[in-house]
Amino acid sequence: MSADTSVPKQREAGLGEFESWLPDAVLRDAPAGMAFLDTESQFVWVNPALARMYGRPVSDFTGQPVAAVWPPVDSARAEAALHRVLEQGHPATETFEAGAAGVANAVASAGNPRTPGPRTFHWFGVRDPDGEVRGVALIVIAGAAGPGTEEALRRSEERYRALVQGGAQIVWVASPDGQMLEDSAEWRWITGQTVEEFLGNGWLDSIHPEDRERVERDWRESLRTGRIFDDRFRMRARGGAYRHYDVRAVPIERDGKIAEWVGACTDVTSQREAEEMRGRLTDQLSAAALRTARLQQATAMLAEALDVEQVVEVITEVGRTAIGALRSAVALLEDDNLGLRVVNPSGLAPTGPDGAGNRLTLDTPSVMTRAIATRRPVLIADPEELRQQFDNDPDVVAADELAADKGDKSDKADKRVLETGDEQAWVGLPLLAAGMPLGALRFSFGKPRTILEEERVFLEALAGQCALAVERAQMYEKEHTAAVTLQHSLLPDELPRVAGLELEAQYLPKATNVGGDWYDVFRLPDRRLAVTVGDVMGKGLLAAAGMGRVRNALRALALTDPRPAAVLAGLDRLFTATELEEQVTTVTYLVIDPETGEGQAGNAGHPPTLLLSPGALPVLDAAEAGTPLGWASPRRQHAFRLPPGSTAVFYSDGLVENRRRGLDAGLDELVRIAASAPPELLGEPGRLLQYLLDNMLAGHEQDDDVTVLVMHVPAAKEAGRNGFGGGPPDQQWAQR
């Protein structure tokens, strides 16, 4: 068909008559829909075929604009095509499905059985003899646009609908101002809206009230800016439930202007639920991992706790950080198994179901006593549940009940008042060792709280670790007390007073344990003095008992044959016969004549004696140290001389060795510190001993027992002055 559709010029006479009858005569019965529109986009002439396509009589079209007689979607497309033809001079051809809503309404009113279908619209200009466009001609071909087109369109539509339904999508078309232009069967099928409820802005009514304002605002912003609309909102389904949809709408432009918006809604409810489930599982796994880490941390901390107070400190910290407890308390059964001793009374509220400040017996109604009695966790989520737990207990009266009874209270005077104070939830856990109760662990919370099953498992595991730690701490405390008692019973109450010698000694046990250090000074039958310092390696009661055996054996041997070599050899035989092979014991032993300061010394693997003399640098005894007791080696002794004014310091390895300082470095530091001591301290053994302790232990954690014994031989006239006095140093002593 030629694009030039101007009517050939006839003879001037009768032209108006020709123009009035020619279209009807030629085009009235054409099978295709045809129409002429003026430059104002109003119908001038319509043939019956086009009128039937829209289910209207021909008279409804004449003089009417397109928007008045066509559905919104068709009229929007028509206006875009008319704009292109009239303003740009280009013909337009477009094939699409006719607007379903408008056609359906028209068909119903006209009784026309035709239904919407694919149509091809051809728009082109109508020009006068001078070439000026006077209007627009329209030819609409219903059905196939060519061989196989209808079948192709049908298959394409089937595939498209299958794709949309398979992807749980809703497709819709909106006008440039955001009004829904045509029916969306998928939308109506899911939401239950009618066509009338959906078109225009009615679709917004199906959006969740909490999402609607945001969606409408964002939609208007996209319409204003022309940007792609991308959102997620909840939409009400036919049954009333809300489902989650991802929504995306893109603008369709024609001739530089937005002609329509095409959007798609994808049901992501399953995805959203899966994400929420993953989130919940992640939170649960994270919480479980955190509780596991807390339990491992608590186990490690409890393993290092040596007494019950330290155990309670750990439990209090774990309760605060792991489960958000307001207070934590541990109560242990007393020796008579009738009462409870709260280890940390600050862990109980002044008022509450466990009665801070009052003695608890197993008959006292409380969270802890109930946990001990039942040997099961007691979980109370709120004050009302607390009241129900103790409602049938004749020994309990609620605080509000007592306050309401303003009359005779004599029958309630001996009853326990059940107050909650600032506590709103409680957990009581029995502490069991080999199935027998040791006490109870209690947590309280500042607001109502339901303990979940995962938390319950954690708390029971924590209570199990706490029970083991308490049992271990109680055993340690008993052993520690026995070891301290034994050790102090074996150490001399006081050192002997010997003319010509001044003696001072101090024993510092490690704060958390007792070792095998000892010192002893005793007279021999020949009036000489035996001095010894020893160390049985190990801790606790076994080390203290070993120390006692060695000390008593040494005394017995010294009274028989006081020579150091003989005494040490006798101790070797004792060790071989009675002690374990892995037991290590060191000892230094000296026999000295107080009148002359001369004697003999022997050493079995012990640190060397520190020797100080006025006017000379401190030195360590250079005599070779032997092996520890029980190790096969010939025992030797060497001459020992302590001139007047001189001092000998005997000590255990705890003074010079620790985790941060090796033995050699410690010995060097001991000599250096002794050299820096004020001169007047050499004549005052007590002050010298304290000076060495203070400086050697400063900055170091004491991880072993420390024993120091100072023996000083006063110089002539030393008692009458503060200095050392007494002439030049003994050269032989200085060399040693």
Image: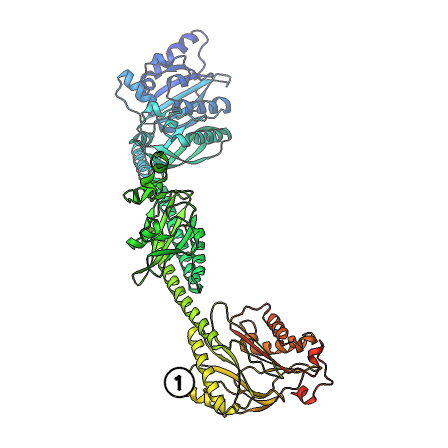
Disc 1 marks which amino acid?
Thr
Using the image, determine if residue 127 lies above or below residue 682.
above
Q: Position of residue 409 (x, y in %)?
A: 34, 38
Q: Position of residue 546 (x, y in %)?
A: 43, 79
Give the residue at x 34% y 49%: 367
Give the residue at x 43% y 43%: 422
319 or 101, which lies in front? 319
Mark 1, residue position: 578
Q: How is the image coloured?
A: rainbow
Assign a secondary structure to mark 1: helix
Q: Quadrant of residue 81?
A: top left
Relative placement, left or right, of 176 versus 196 is right
Q: Position of residue 189 (x, y in %)?
A: 30, 31
The N terminus appears in which quarter of the rendering? top left
Relative placement, left or right, of 80 versus 700 is left
94 or 583, which lies in front? 583
134 or 730, which lies in front? 730
The answer to whether one can see residue 631 in this image is no
Mark 1 Cα within 10 Å, few/some/many (few <14, many 20+)? few
